[in-house]
Image (cartoon, rainbow, N blue to C red):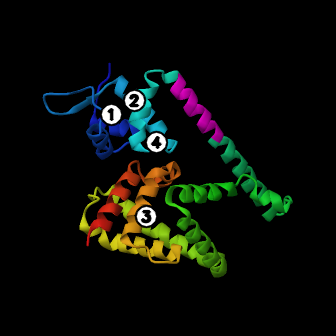
C-alpha cells in the first residue's frame, strides 16, 4: 500500500502543507502514523477521507461541521458520494443554463440571433439575494432590515457605475488579504492592520454607515455561518475563510 508524506499528499491533492497540518491539529484528518523521523504518513484510508473533506468544502460546508458529518455518515461512502453527485449535478444544471444564456447573448451581439428581453436573465437567481437578506434578518434582527433597505436606497441613487466601482474596490481589498494568506502570514499579525483598515472602510462605503469594530467582528461570524461565503472565499485558497475571519476578529479586538 502506498504511503505519502505530507508534502507528497499536498502535491497529489493540491491541498497546501499548511492546510494539511491544520486539518491534523483540529482532528479532521489525522495521518495513519508518524514515523521515527517525525514525518506524517498518509495511506489509502486517509486519502479517501481527504476526498470527503474536499467534497464537503466544495459544497460550502463549514470546517467545524465536516468532522461531525463524517462521523455521522460513517463509512457508507457510496451514500456520501451519491449525495455529493446529486448536489454537483444541480450545480452543473445551473451552470448549463447560464452558459446557454451567454451563448445566446453572444449570438445576438454578433448579429446571429435575437433574444427576448426576459431571456437575458435566464439562469440567474434573483431570489438568492432575497434569501441572504432573509437569513440576515432572521439571525441578526429587524434592525438589519433597516440597514438593507437604506443600502438599497443609497445604491439605487448612486447608480450601477458607482456600484461597480465600489465592488471593484472590495475585490482589490479581498485579493490583497488573500495574497497574505497564501504567503503564510499569521492571521493575528498586526502587519495586516493597514489592509483591514482599507477593507473595513470599504464595508463602511457599502453599508453607507460606519462599520464599527464590533460590527466588523460580527460580519466575520456571518461569513462563517452561511455556507455560500465558504464557497466564495475559499476559491482563493482552501482555508482562506477560516484565516480571514480569524484575522478580522483579531483586528477588531485590537484597540
Which residue lies under the disc numbered 4? 57
Q: CA distance from mark 1 to mark 4?
A: 14 Å
Which residue lies under the disc numbered 3? 175
Which is closer to the viewer, label 1 or label 3?
A: 1
Specify few, some or many for label 3: CA neighbours under 10 Å numbering under 14, 14-19, or 20 or more: few
Residue at (65% x, 39% y) in the render: 90
Helix, strand or loop at label 2? It is helix
Helix, strand or loop at label 1? It is loop
Q: CA distance from mark 1 to mark 2?
A: 7 Å
Tell me if label 3 and label 4 are in contact, CB under 8 Å.
no
Q: Is residue 224 magenta?
A: no
Instruction: Say which label, 1 or 2, has the lower sequence index.
Output: 1
Instruction: Say which label, 1 or 3, has the lower sequence index.
Output: 1
> What kind of secondary structure does the magenta stretch mostly adopt?
helix
Q: Is residue 85 magenta?
A: yes
Q: Nearer the viewer, residue 187 or 13?
A: 187
Q: Is residue 110 visible?
A: no
Which residue lies under the disc numbered 1? 29
Please provide the residue range marked out in magenta: 79-90
91 relative to 77, above or below: below
Q: Is residue 73 visible?
A: yes
Question: At which x and y percent is residue 38?
Answer: 15, 33
Residue lying farthest top? Answer: 1
Which is closer to the viewer, label 3 or label 4?
A: 4
Q: Which mark is residue 94?
A: none
Query: Which of the image's four quarters has the N terminus?
Result: top left
Q: Nearer the viewer, residue 108 or 232?
A: 232
Which residue lies under the disc numbered 2? 49
Residue at (65% x, 75% y) in the render: 160
Amino acid at each position: 500500500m502506498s504511503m505519502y508524506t505530507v508534502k507528497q499528499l499536498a502535491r497529489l491533492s493540491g491541498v497546501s502543507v499548511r492546510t494539511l497540518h491544520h486539518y491534523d491539529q483540529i482532528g479532521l484528518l489525522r495521518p495513519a502514523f508518524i514515523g521515527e523521523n517525525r514525518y506524517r504518513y498518509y495511506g489509502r484510508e486517509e486519502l479517501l477521507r481527504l476526498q470527503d473533506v474536499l467534497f464537503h468544502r466544495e459544497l460550502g460546508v463549514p470546517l467545524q461541521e465536516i468532522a461531525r458529518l463524517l462521523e455521522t455518515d460513517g463509512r457508507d461512502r457510496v451514500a456520501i458520494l451519491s449525495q455529493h453527485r446529486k448536489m454537483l449535478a444541480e450545480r452543473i444544471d445551473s451552470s448549463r443554463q447560464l452558459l446557454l444564456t451567454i451563448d445566446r447573448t453572444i449570438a445576438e451581439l454578433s448579429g446571429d440571433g435575437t433574444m427576448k428581453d426576459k431571456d437575458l436573465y435566464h439562469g440567474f437567481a434573483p431570489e438568492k439575494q432575497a434569501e441572504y437578506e432573509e437569513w440576515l434578518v432572521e439571525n441578526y434582527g429587524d434592525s438589519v432590515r433597516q440597514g438593507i433597505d437604506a443600502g438599497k436606497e443609497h445604491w439605487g441613487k448612486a447608480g450601477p457605475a458607482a456600484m461597480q466601482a465600489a465592488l471593484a474596490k472590495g475585490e482589490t481589498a479581498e485579493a490583497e488579504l488573500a495574497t497574505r494568506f497564501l504567503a503564510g502570514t499569521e492571521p493575528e499579525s498586526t502587519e495586516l492592520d493597514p489592509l483591514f483598515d482599507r477593507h473595513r472602510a470599504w464595508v463602511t462605503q457599502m453599508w453607507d454607515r460606519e462599520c464599527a469594530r464590533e460590527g466588523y467582528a460580527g460580519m466575520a461570524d456571518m461569513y462563517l455561518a452561511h455556507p455560500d461565503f465558504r464557497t466564495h472565499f475559499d476559491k482563493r485558497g482552501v482555508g482562506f475563510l477560516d484565516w480571514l475571519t480569524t484575522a478580522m476578529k483579531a483586528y477588531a479586538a485590537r484597540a
